[in-house]
C-alpha cells in the first residue's frame, strides 16, 4: 500500500478549485501557513470522533450548523455569539427530545470556500469568474475582485483563529450554563406564534427544577456550565488544508489542523479525485455529502477509501436529496452500507436539496420543505431499522430573512428586508429554534416507538 502523504492530492484530478496566476505568491503563502500553529488539536478530533461514533449507535445525536459561507466583511464577535447561542438552545431542546447527549458542531472557523455550479457567471452581458468564497476571491462583480488571491488564506486563518478563541471562551466560561440557555428558550416560546412549543419548554423547566432540588446545581456539576463545541467545514481549498496538516506527535497520524471535522461535498466526491485522496489520510472525522447521483457502487468504494479500518465515528454520511426524494434515494445507500458492513453515522442535510428561486428573484429555502425532508429521513430509517444520527443546517443566529416560512411566517415579499448571505439562504434564529422543537418531536416519537 502506498504511503499517504499530505501532498498526494496534487497528483489527482482536481475540480472546484481556483487556478492561481501568482504561483510565487501562492508558494509564499503556503510556506507561511505551514509555520503557523494548527487551529485544532488531535485530542479534540479524537474526542469528536468518539462522540460521532456514539451518534452512529443511537447513543448521541449530532447538531451541525452555521453559515453557508463565512464572510470577512460580516465577521464580528456578536455574530459568533448569536450563532453559538441559538445552537445551544437547539441542542438543549434536542437533548430533551432524544434523551441522549447532543454533539455540537459549528460550520464555523473555516467555512470560507464554496463550490459553484458553473465556473463563470454573467451579469448584464458581462461574464466573470464565479465567486468562490472569501478565502479565494471577492463577491464584488469586477474583474479585479474575481481574481483568486492566495493572501486571502492568511486572512481566513486569522479569522478562524479568532473565532475558535471566542468559541472556546464561550464554551467554558459560563455563557453556556444550562439554566441561562433555557431562559433564552423560554423567551422564544412566549411569542404568540411560538406558543405551541411552550409545553415542551415547561417540561424542560420541570426537569431542571428537579435536578436543582436533587442537589445537581451549576456549581456542583461542571457539565451544566460548559459544553464541548467543535468546528467543521468543507475541505475544498486543498492548498490551505495541506499547509495546516500536522503529524500528531503521540501517534504519528496526520491531523487536518484547519478544523475538528472536514467534509467532502457532493460535487467533489470522485473516488479517484483530489479531495477524497486528501481526506483519506487524516485522523479527523470526515463527512461525505450524498446526493441523488450517489450510486451504491461509488459509496462502497468511498467508504473503503475514507474509512479502511471501519472505525466508528470516522465517517459521517450526510444525506441531501430534497423534500419528496428521500425515499427514492436513501434506501439504496442504506442497503449499500449494510452490505458492506460499514460503520457510519447517518445525518440529514435538508438545506441543499430544497433551494429554489422565489418569485421576487431571491434564492430561498421554504421552511416546510426543510422540515419535510427531515421527517422523510426519519421515516426511511425507521422503515429500515437504522439510526438517524443527526441533522446539518445552514443557519445563523441573526434575524435575517433568507428562508421563507416558519412560525413568524417570512413571506416572499419579506426576503429583501434582511437578505445578507453571500451565498446560500440560511435559517434565522427563530426558524432554527423552531426546527429544533419539531425535530425533537420526531426524536421523541422514535424513542417511544422503539
Image (tube, grey):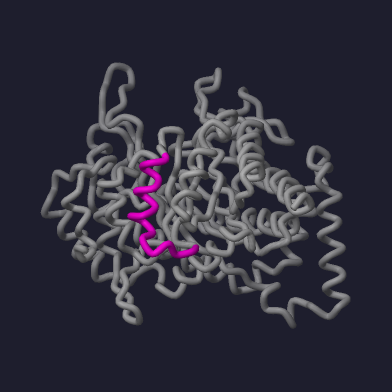
Q: Is residue 334 above or below residue 230?
A: above
Query: Where is the N terminus found, in terms of image quarters?
Result: bottom left
Residue at left offset 65%, top offset 67%: 176
The part of the chain drawn in magenta is 296-312
Work out whether residue 150 can be spotted: yes
Image x and y of residue 225, in percent:
68, 73
For residue 284, side relative to residue 243 (left or right)? right
Residue 203, above or below 224: above
Residue situated in front as seen by the camera: 51 or 25: 51
| Residue in view at x 31 percent, y 51 percent | 276
Q: Residue furthest front?
A: 339
Residue 181: give x, y in percent of width and height: 71, 61
Q: Residue at x 40, y 56 (%)?
A: 262
**Can residue 420 be seen at all in this image of the molecule?**
no
Q: How many marks?
A: 0
Majority SS type along the magenta span: helix
Q: Is residue 399 left or right of residue 434?
A: left
Left or right: where 189 falls relative to 423: right
Q: Residue lying furthest left in this view? A: 24
Q: Residue at x 84, y 48 (%)?
A: 198
Horizontal relation, residue 318 to residue 206: left or right: left
Task: Answer with the quarter of the image where residue 58 lies.
Answer: bottom right
Above or below residue 415? Residue 397 is below
Comparing 284 with 413, the one in front is 284
Residue 302 magenta: yes
Q: Position of residue 332 (x, y in %)?
A: 49, 38
- Whether the magenta-drawn stretch holds residue 244 is answered as no
On the image, the x and y values in percent for residue 410 come to 66, 31
Residue 54 or 97: which is nearer the viewer? Answer: 54
Amino acid at each position: 500500500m502506498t504511503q499517504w502523504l499530505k501532498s498526494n492530492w496534487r497528483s489527482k484530478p482536481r475540480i472546484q478549485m481556483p487556478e492561481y496566476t501568482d504561483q510565487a505568491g501562492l508558494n509564499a503563502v503556503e510556506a507561511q501557513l505551514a509555520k503557523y500553529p494548527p487551529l485544532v488539536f488531535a485530542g479534540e478530533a479524537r474526542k469528536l470522533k468518539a462522540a460521532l461514533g456514539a451518534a452512529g449507535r443511537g447513543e448521541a445525536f449530532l447538531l451541525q450548523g452555521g453559515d453557508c459561507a463565512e464572510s470577512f466583511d460580516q465577521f464580528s464577535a456578536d455574530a459568533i455569539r448569536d450563532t453559538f447561542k441559538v445552537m445551544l438552545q437547539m441542542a438543549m431542546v434536542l437533548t430533551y427530545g432524544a434523551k441522549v447527549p447532543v454533539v455540537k458542531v459549528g460550520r464555523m472557523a473555516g467555512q470560507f470556500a464554496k463550490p459553484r455550479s458553473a465556473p463563470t457567471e454573467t451579469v448584464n452581458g458581462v461574464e466573470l469568474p464565479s465567486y468562490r468564497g472569501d478565502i479565494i476571491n471577492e463577491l464584488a462583480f469586477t474583474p479585479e475582485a474575481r481574481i483568486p488571491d492566495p493572501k486571502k488564506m492568511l486572512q481566513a486563518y486569522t479569522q478562524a483563529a479568532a473565532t475558535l478563541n471566542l468559541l472556546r471562551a464561550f464554551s467554558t466560561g459560563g455563557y453556556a450554563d444550562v439554566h441561562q440557555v433555557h431562559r433564552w428558550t423560554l423567551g422564544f416560546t412566549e411569542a404568540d406564534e411560538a406558543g405551541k412549543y411552550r409545553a415542551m419548554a415547561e417540561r424542560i423547566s420541570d426537569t431542571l427544577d428537579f435536578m436543582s432540588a436533587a442537589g445537581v446545581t451549576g456549581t456542583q456539576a461542571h457539565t451544566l456550565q460548559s459544553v464541548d463545541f467543535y468546528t467543521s467545514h468543507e475541505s475544498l481549498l486543498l492548498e490551505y488544508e495541506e499547509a495546516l496538516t500536522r503529524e500528531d506527535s503521540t501517534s504519528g497520524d496526520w491531523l487536518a489542523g484547519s478544523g475538528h471535522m472536514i467534509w467532502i461535498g457532493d460535487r467533489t466526491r470522485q473516488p479517484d479525485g483530489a479531495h477524497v485522496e486528501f481526506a483519506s489520510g487524516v485522523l479527523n472525522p470526515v463527512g461525505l455529502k450524498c446526493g441523488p447521483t450517489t450510486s451504491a457502487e461509488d459509496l462502497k468504494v468511498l467508504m473503503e477509501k475514507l474509512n479502511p479500518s471501519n472505525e466508528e465515528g470516522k465517517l459521517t454520511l450526510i444525506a441531501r436529496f430534497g423534500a419528496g426524494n428521500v425515499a427514492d434515494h436513501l434506501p439504496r445507500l442504506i442497503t449499500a452500507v449494510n452490505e458492506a458492513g460499514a460503520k457510519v453515522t447517518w445525518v440529514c442535510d435538508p438545506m441543499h436539496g430544497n433551494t429554489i428561486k422565489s418569485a421576487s428573484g431571491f434564492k430561498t429555502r421554504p421552511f416546510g420543505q426543510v422540515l419535510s425532508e427531515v421527517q422523510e429521513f426519519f421515516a426511511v430509517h425507521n422503515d429500515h431499522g437504522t439510526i438517524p444520527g443527526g441533522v446539518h443546517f445552514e443557519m445563523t443566529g441573526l434575524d435575517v430573512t433568507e428562508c421563507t416560512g416558519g412560525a413568524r411566517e417570512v413571506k416572499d415579499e419579506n426576503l429583501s428586508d434582511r437578505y445578507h448571505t453571500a451565498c446560500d439562504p440560511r435559517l434565522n434564529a427563530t426558524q432554527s429554534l423552531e426546527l429544533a422543537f419539531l425535530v425533537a418531536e420526531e426524536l421523541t416519537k422514535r424513542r417511544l416507538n422503539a
